Amino acid sequence: MEGPVYYYERKLGEQETEIKSLTAEIELLRNFAFVGNSPNLEALREENAKLKYRLNILRKSLEEEKNKSVKSMININSQLQDIFGRAINAAFPELENAPLAVTPNQQPKFGDYQCNSAMSLTQILKARNQKVNPRETAEKIVKNLPANDLIEKTDIAGPGFINIHLRKDFVSKQLSKLLVNGVQPPSVEEKKKVVVDFSSPNIAKEMHVGHLRSTIIGDSICRLFEFVGHEVLRINHLGDWGTQFGMLIAHLQDKFPNYLTVSPPIGDLQSFYKESKKRFDEDEEFKKRAYFCVVQLQSKQPDIMRAWNLICDVSRKEFQKIYDCLDIRIIDRGESYYQDKMIQVVKEFEEKGLVELDEGRKVVFPPGCTVPLTIVKSDGGFTYDTSDLAALKQRLVEEKADIIIYVVDSGQGGHLQNVYAAGQMIGWYDPKVTRVEHAGFGVVLGEDKKKFKTRSGDTVRLIDLLEEGLKRSMDKLKEKERDKVLTPEELIAAQKSVAFGCIKYADLSHNRMNDYIFSFDKMLDDRGNTAAYLLYAYTRIRSIARLANISEEALHKAAQETEVSLQHEKEWKLGKCILRFPEILQKILDDLLLHILCDYLYELATTFTEFYDNCYCVEKDRQTGNVVKINMGRMLLSDATAAVMAKGFEILDIKPVQRM
């Protein structure tokens, strides 16, 4: 994998070579007396000027990337893969794309990381009739390791496992860099345009617990891509168009006939929807008017558009209350946005001969898909398939997205694969160049392991769930008598932090592919892998320096002057755990599985507890309680732990507080 600095240096070299070549051509033309207004000479001069301009931009980018790379956290796993990759290429130059596997060592007593490539390489070599065993292969790899700053020593175990021991001075320097520069994102090759489609509730319907997963997972994916430096477009693909709006508008006209001059007081849009649906099912005359309203809506008749906008605005205000609670930033771009683009999409498929007729419908069969996409209904109307295709094209062609992520429930997986396959078939994108991915997720279950519903069997309203979380959070804090210690403002901050943090973390800490059981009791438990435990752990770590009267300025100064202590085995274990943060982020960027970050933060918190129980940071007089001695190297380890936890919380959008 080519790092950003090497990428820009390579590009810079290519541009400089091109400029030298053009300059030589210009000089050659001059020597042959092609002067004045020679078109060849002018064209070359113009091209030369353009390239010089691009060269200056690249030089600037190179400087920026070099400055960032000095501050960026190093992905140790990635660096080791690079080192061992070069060793394998040197040892076995005849092998192309040789297998490479470097992972953290599961048994620290044998080393910090492990390279397990020798066995796979031996199988390949044996297939080529070479007599070799895995241990000999491993020895050859080790012999060809290039000089580096990371590795203290290696040893070979069993049938060829290469155990890697990191240098303590390297780890200490990386920790110091983290403390001086803050938790900086690992370097990425190129800044990319990322579109994330998430949340996506339906207008005129309330957000329910089913929208919780898409909203929380999508927001955290956005935060991660933003943190590493990509440009992210957060899209709310609202269900704001379709036949259901006919009955809503017809009902609005009857219930509030003066809606054009007086804003209708639609307080409960859910009840309004149910009323209109009941009339639609029971009243044939109303149904006819509803269908006529759909026709008027599609032709964008002004009064009907006004009614449609009123209904959408009421919904958006309700959605925004939830987004404000959960701190969600998102741009509304519903199905209506793509209506005018659908005509062109259908035309494009027809012109390329990809449309088939099926009982009056126009359908498309993407390769490898058994169920066709219906792009025009028998009555001439468009479908969800059409709008999804139009949305995909808009994101690829107009937004010029490099990565598109759909955070939609797993039940939509088959449909989305059809849409992606159709996009590839028509030539909108090449999956080897553009990443289009479905980040699917399971359903939320109740404690009875059935779909999460109210006692009456209704879908759980999301706003009710959040309010219940706030109530239970306050009850928990009062149970622990925190209301007697914290100021009213601190208590409210802690209440919100715990309530919304626990709801988010309970979701994100489970593999998104699986269903998960929603339990307030479990998520508010301050034991185990919960937000409550992590928030309390973070607050405790931050309090160590405060109780020892060490200011942030003093810690920052110490970070520049004091070496981070790594002599004790628990110090060493914690230091390595802290520095695994970039490789954890890289794995999530690849897999979009946020529970990996939750597991890491829990491991970091428990590793810190081990360290704190075995290594004093602040020594106090047992009788007076006065501070006798401060181990600043260990204080710095504590500070680095808190800094990484805080950044992890930021990606998960969990708000820690200083006092809890």
Image (cartoon, helix red, strand yellow):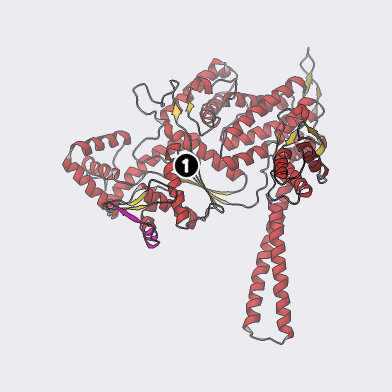
* Helix, strand or loop status at disc 1: loop
Tell me: residue 79, above or below residue 48.
above
Q: Which sits in the foreground, 549 or 500?
A: 500
**Does any portion of residue 329 appear in the rendered image?**
yes
Q: Which residue is mark 1?
A: 198
Query: Is residue 560 at least partly visible in the picture?
Result: no
Position of 317 with respect to 245 (left or right) is right
Say above or below: 404 vs 156.
below
Image coordinates of residue 258 in percent, x first then y, are 23, 45
Give me the residue at 80% from left, 16% from top: 621
Q: Residue at x 65, y 77 (%)?
A: 44
Q: Which residues are magenta?
A: 347-358
Is residue 619 depicted above or below 496 in this figure?
above
- Position of residue 22 measured from the top left corner of the image (x, y, whole percent): 69, 74
Left or right position of 227 against 325: right
> In the image, 313: left or right of 256?
right
Amino acid type for the residue under numbered disc 1: Phe
Task: Give how far across and how far down residue 236 sits, in percent.
Answer: 44, 44
Say which quadrant the C terminus sits in.
top right
Closest to the observer, 259 or 287: 287
